[in-house]
Structures are given as C-alpha cells and as structure tokens.
Amino acid sequence: MKTDSNAYLTFALGDEKFAIPVDHVQEVVEFGQVTKVPNAPLYMLGIINLRGRVLPLLDTKLKLGLTSTDRTKKSRIMVLDITTTDDKNLQIGATVDVAREVVEISANEIQEAPEFENLKTTAPITGIVNRQGDITLIMDITRVFSVSEVLELNRSLN
C-alpha cells in the first residue's frame, strides 16, 4: 500500500519545531548584511541583497507572535517563494533559529490542529506530526506571510 509522502524542511524557532513543504523553499542561506528600512513594520528586519536580488527580510518569530531573540551562529534565512493569486512568484527572506533537515512526511502522519478556543482557525498551522512524542508543527506559510503583505512590502521597496 502506497501512501502519499511529501518532503518538508524542518526548522526551529526557539524550542518549537516547525516544517514547511520544500517546494516553497528556494534555499537556506547564512545571515549577511541587513539594511534597515525606515517606517517598516516591526516584523520586517530590513532588506537583504541575495546575489543581486533585493528581498524583504521578515522575523518569523514576530510574525507568529513569539518573542524575537538574538541571532546566533546557527540562525539562518530561508528564501521562500510565495505564489500570488495571479500566479506571480514573490520571494522573501524569513529568519529561523536553526534550519534542521529535509524529511519525508506521509499524509497519514499529519494530524489536524486541535480545536481549542479557535486555535484551529487562528493558528497558522495546517497540521501536527507526532513522531514518538517529537512534535512538529506544519506551518501554513501563506497565512504567516500573506501575499497582500508581501506585495505591499515589495511595493514599498521599489
């Protein structure tokens, strides 16, 4: 019996483990120079130059309502592809504390988010994977980094 399985990039934000489908991740890079942008939203750390492309750099923890922490040697930037409603691809940099590994997760391993005081409708996760007590939250990047926000950030950069 074959089950549908997809590749996910796992990463840490503080003590929490998250995963996103690898088809949204263009690459993972080390931190370089970040240029601050005046009057940018709090979660926007600035812009980065990635081989000639200017990308907005967003603090993933702040976007999730978590407390931002200082960068460490393990901190990384995930370069994410966000697809707009008119099928344009936008790219952003999203900070993570640690980029871990690419893992295969089968569809039947993913449990629904628990129904708890609207958690299911407000939390930007599409599911939960529990492997022998090691819990990984599957992040819905289209809800964390909404297309309208990314479009607005890109407009403010141009």
Image (cartoon, rainbow, N blue to C red):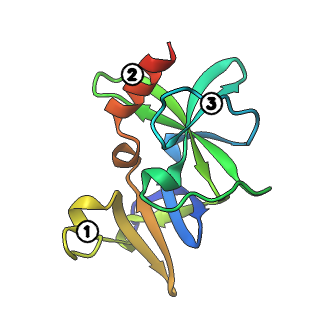
- Residue 1, position as x, y percentages in the image: 38, 71
Nearest to the eye among marks 2 and 3: give it. 3
Looking at the picture, which amino acid does disc 2 mark?
A: Lys
Q: What residue lies at 53% left-to-right and 70% top-to-bottom?
A: 16
Inter-mark Cα distance, 2 to 3: 26 Å
Q: In which quarter of the image is residue 107?
A: bottom left
The relative height of residue 132 versus residue 37 in the rendered view (above or below) is: below
Q: Mark 1 points at which residue?
A: 119
In this figure, what is the number of numbered marks? 3
When the figure is inspected, residue 124 is found, relative to residue 14, above or below; the finding is above
Q: Mark 2 points at which residue?
A: 88
Q: Is residue 127 something that shows in the picture?
A: yes
Q: CB of mark 1 within 8 Å of CB of mark 3? A: no
Q: Are marks 2 and 3 in contact (CB under 8 Å)?
A: no
Asked if residue 21 can be seen in this view, the reply is: no
**Badge nearest the viewer, 1 or 3:** 3
Give the percent coordinates (x, y) of residue 157: 51, 18
Q: Nearer the viewer, residue 10 or 158?
A: 158
Q: Which of 36 and 144 is in front in this view?
A: 36
First reached walking from the N terminus: tag 2 or tag 1: 2
Residue name at image x 38 percent, y 25 percent: 152
Residue that carries the numbered disc 3 in the rendered image: 36
Q: At label 1, which amino acid type do we have?
A: Leu
Classify 128 as above or below 46: below
Judged from the image, the secondary structure of the residue bearing numbered disc 1 is helix
